[in-house]
Amino acid sequence: MVVGKILLQGGMVVSGSETKQADVLINGDLIEAVGPDLADQLQDRDEAEVVDCSGKLLFPGFIDPHTHFQMQASKCVTADDFDSGTRAALAGGTTVILDFTTQNRGETLMFALERWHRMADGHCSCDYGFHMSITDWNEEVRSEIPLMTENGVTSWKVYMAYPALRISDIEIYEILQAVQEEGGIVGNHCENGDLIDAVTHALREQGKLGTEAHPIAHSRGIESEAVNRYLVIAEEAGTPVNIVHLSTKEGLEFARKARKRGQTVCIETCPQYFFLDDSLYSLPDFEGAKYVFSPPARKKEDQDALWEALENGEIDTIGTDHCSFNFAVEKRIGEHDFSAIPNGIPGVEHRPALMYTYAVDTGRISKEAFCRLLSENVAREYGMYPKKGLIAQGSDADIVVWDPNAEGVITAADQTQNVDYTPYEGMKTKGRAEKVYLHGELAAQDGKVVKTGLGRYVHRGPADLSFRDKREE
Ligand SMILES: [Zn+2]
């Protein structure tokens, strides 16, 4: 599609390393130039639409590395599909989402990938890519790993929990080595599945069926043991690893120890682990079900440890684990048994404003660190940099014009996410995506999508973990 030139004038352009005043010239779907006073260089001033960005921050489009859209749970499907989920992402300033393709047992990886393409292709309003979750490891699947690379899938997921998904330690070991040969990276859902099942069984026997039992069945030790085990497996395999949705202080400490031993360990966490705590599970009237996700919300000391890690640069990426179920419908499946509540919360729309408000505006982290956590590091780790994750000549014109002073309140009534609640209801925000450009087209403005269906599949390359090595120095 041919789009005219757009000049974003007078804003502050943020990257992972600096913030500087610069104009940005968009030509078609790419960034043509970044620099001072670009208007002077235009042949004819009228050839570009000039957008005044003074007082605004320009970020490379945010990337959410962790969503579950149109995902089948045991007895239902998520409230957000690729249509509403990617619209919600875009509304908040996220221009790429990475969703999890899951191989069901007995399927080939290609079969699973094609199923996800059928769900997503032609339905997305922001760009999208897929991680591949392996649940059935065998020689045929091993031989498909290069094929996935050819198809732009270079990041992987394994589960240590959930009966239908979990695989054994030796399988994880072999997958780590096979993926390493292709330059990919493997994320892990770190929870001890045997213990979840045993404790859940015991709680049910005791008649403890309310939502307050959820964090007991997914205790902190159940996560941290699995984190440590994964790190030991990775050390034996000699590969880097990614820990997704890290939630506990103890898990963080195991990751620190592994890094001290010289291992390359990437850490993702999510807004829920900063803002929600386990007291929510004791809310009356089944309200606790709104916060049933795994790993669950933790204690204040875990939140404090994660904040400290965020400030120290020990956290690499922030995803949402967006996996939405309506409180009035799907969550009710577990009304009489917490273990039947579909796990997950919405968040894809609100991650940028939440993290900007409570991490940047409060002075805990810099704008540059925010840029790394929500965009640059994500683009590098998942093989999209510098097409994504950077405002520079030749990069995709995915740009968020951010108003650092816009004040708002998060409410379900006002959200684009297609779900009947938000776990962040009533939280105040400062800063929001005023304009969101996707491949050079204005796709969202003032929190609302103005152009749908622009999303393209992102064919990704090998992982670049240099940001992690640099931190180690
Ligand atoms: Zn997830």
Image (cartoon, grey):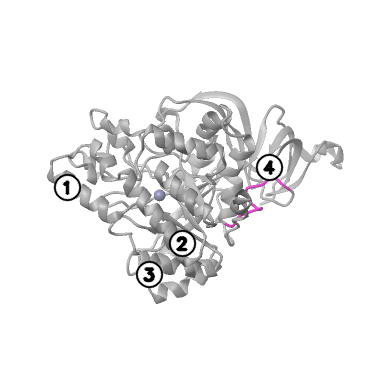
Residue 430 part of the magenta-drawn span: no
Say what secondary structure mark 2 lies in: helix
Q: Give the residue number, with chain letter if any, for mark 3.
A: 137
How far apart marks 1 and 3 lie (CA) works out to 31 Å
Q: Amino acid at mark 3?
A: Trp
Q: Give the residue number, with chain letter if any, for mark 4.
A: 17
Q: Amino acid at mark 2?
A: Ala
How far apart marks 3 and 4 lie (CA) works out to 40 Å
Q: Dot 4, how many residues are within 10 Å of its Cα: few (below 14), some (14-19), or many (20+)? A: few
How far apart marks 2 and 3 lie (CA) works out to 17 Å
Tell me whether circle 3 and circle 4 mark residues in contact (CB < 8 Å).
Answer: no
Q: Give the residue number, with chain letter if any, for mark 2.
A: 234
Say what secondary structure mark 1 lies in: helix
> Could you tell me which residue is drawn at 45 percent across and 44 percent down?
85
Tell me whether circle 1 and circle 4 mark residues in contact (CB < 8 Å).
Answer: no
* Rendering coords of residue 48 (x, y %): 77, 39
Say what secondary structure mark 4 lies in: loop
Q: Amino acid at mark 4?
A: Ser
* Rendering coords of residue 420 (x, y %): 35, 34
Q: Is residue 264 above or below residue 390?
A: below
